[in-house]
Amino acid sequence: MMVKLRLRRRGRKRLRVYDIVAADSRSPRDGRYIERLGQYNPLVTSGATMLDRERVAYWLKRGAQPTDTVRNILSREGVLLAMQMEAKGAPADEIASAVDAHVMHHRSREATRANNKKASAEAAGETEEEVADAPAEQGESATSEATPETATAEATTVEVDTAPVEEAAPEEETPAEKAPAAEAEEPPAEETTGDESNNEEKSGK
């Protein structure tokens, strides 16, 4: 029987939690298993993991093959490092300190990565808001600029319309202006009358 160390899903659809189990390679993914070795929660930052390290090492020494995901978890948690150092004959206290440093390094790196990802998402959200606000501001400025031009155009129209009326007024003749013209035409008539009277006097003589 080929034994595999793999994840077994449980929990609700959006709240998935995985058990790390030793199971027959022929059984379904979420089917029966031989032994539960730990738990993995991907919803927690850096992935919360609980492992029975001794039992995991037991199955690995018996030839059990971990899946890629389980292998990454075991590597991150220092299980594979501890087995390598143990195989080389390192003392237990040295193995423990090396495993602790290894685990802290990985968790710190994953926390930094998560913070950077969150900051990038927030920056992208702010950029989208600025881009969305820009067209509205441009529309307001265009409206404010168009208003003075409209007022100027209206004022020009009024001036153009009123100018002909003011110029047309002097063309009309008033009674006062007609009277001097009539008086100016009367003197030649008087002069003609005077000439006629002189002619009559000469003829009488």
Image: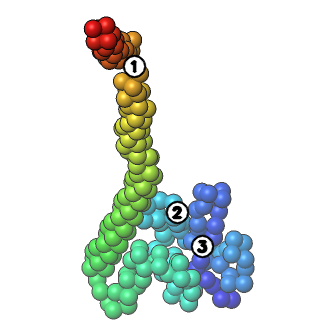
The first of marks 3 and 2 along the sequence is 3
Q: Nearer the viewer, mark 3 or mark 1?
A: 1
Determine which of the numbered discs, if any, sits on residue 173 in the image: 1
The residue lying at 48 percent from left, 69 percent from top is: 51
Find residue 36 and report its image quarter. Answer: bottom right
User: Would you say residue 164 is visible in this rendering?
Assistant: yes
Residue furthest bottom in the image: 88
The first of marks 3 and 1 along the sequence is 3
In the rendered view, tell whether residue 86 sits above or below residue 154: below
Residue type, mark 1 in image: Glu
Residue located beneath label 3 in the image: 7
**Secondary structure type for disc 3:** strand
Residue type, mark 3 in image: Leu
Residue located beneath label 2 in the image: 41
The residue lying at 35 percent from left, 64 percent from top is: 116
Residue type, mark 2 in image: Asn
Dot 2 crowding, Cα within 10 Å, few <14, some 14–19, many 20+ = some
